[in-house]
Amino acid sequence: MDILWSPWRYDYIKSSGSGSRHDPNACIFCDIPAAPGTDVEKRILLRASFNYIILNIYPYISGHLLIVPFAHLADLDAASKESTDEMMDLSKRAQTALRDVYHPHGFNLGMNLGAAAGAGVAGHYHQHVMPRWSGDVNFMTAVSETRVVSEDLETTYAKLLPGFKGNSP
């Protein structure tokens, strides 16, 4: 029998059914930047004026980033121009950092707005930025709904952080 090991999922499993995850007024994307602890502990790579960049803690692939507005809004069209302009600038910066570290063949950038569109956090819009390689979609996802991520989040964070130091977005 083959065993797939993903130890970071334990905290997610353990927390289901308790705490703010099930509080209808709680929002993980509002809670993270305000929570005690360092940005390293929270895996925040950059705080800008209207948005922050964070590692997705349940990535589809190594280097999966999220660009999240500080404002709690469900829809992109409710956001200020300054916020969405900055989000696009941060998307460009994320693409550069991911290219410099991972040398991917391409990128996925996208949003899922609303639960029906697949948003895991439907009340707070955010942008995904992911590096992609030719052939990285393998049989694991198609056959067993399993993703294989080749490095832990601490390694990903350490690799990407230098690309977000200095220079404002």
Image (spheres, helix red, strand yellow):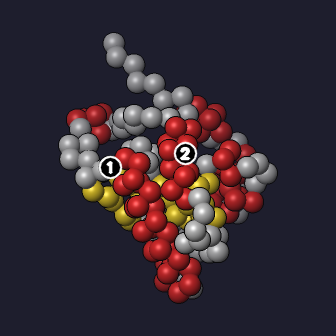
Label 1 Cα neighbours within 10 Å, binned few <14 / some 14-19 / many ≥20: few
Residue 17 position, x and y percent, is 65, 41
Q: Closer to the camera: disc 2 or disc 1?
A: 1
Q: Which amino acid is tagged 1?
A: His
Mark 2 and mark 1: Cα distance apart in space: 16 Å
Give percent across and percent down for residue 155: 52, 37
Q: Quadrant of residue 98?
A: bottom left
The answer to whether residue 146 shows anywhere in this view is: yes
Question: Which residue is at a point 51% across and 56% down the rendered structure image?
Answer: 163
| Residue shown at 47% from the left, 74% from the top | 89
Residue with the mark numbered 1: 103
Helix, strand or loop for disc 2: helix
Is 75 above or below relative to 135?
A: below
Left or right: 41, with 73 as reference point: right
Q: Nearer the viewer, residue 136 or 10?
A: 136
Residue appearing at x 64%, y 64% in the figure: 47
Residue 121 bears which disc, if any? Answer: none
Is 93 situated above or below 49? above
Q: Residue furthest top?
A: 1
Q: Please count the marks in the image.
A: 2
Quadrant housing the N terminus: top left
- Residue ranking furthest to the left: 135
Q: Residues within 10 Å of mark 2 (few under 14, many from 20)?
A: some
* Residue that badge 2 annotates: 157
Mark 1 secondary-structure assignment: loop
In this view, the residue in front, 10 or 157, is: 157
* Amino acid on which the number 2 mark rests in the picture: Tyr
Q: Which quarter shows the C terminus?
A: bottom right
In the figure, 93 relative to 98: above or below?
Answer: below
N-terminal-most mark, 2 or 1: 1
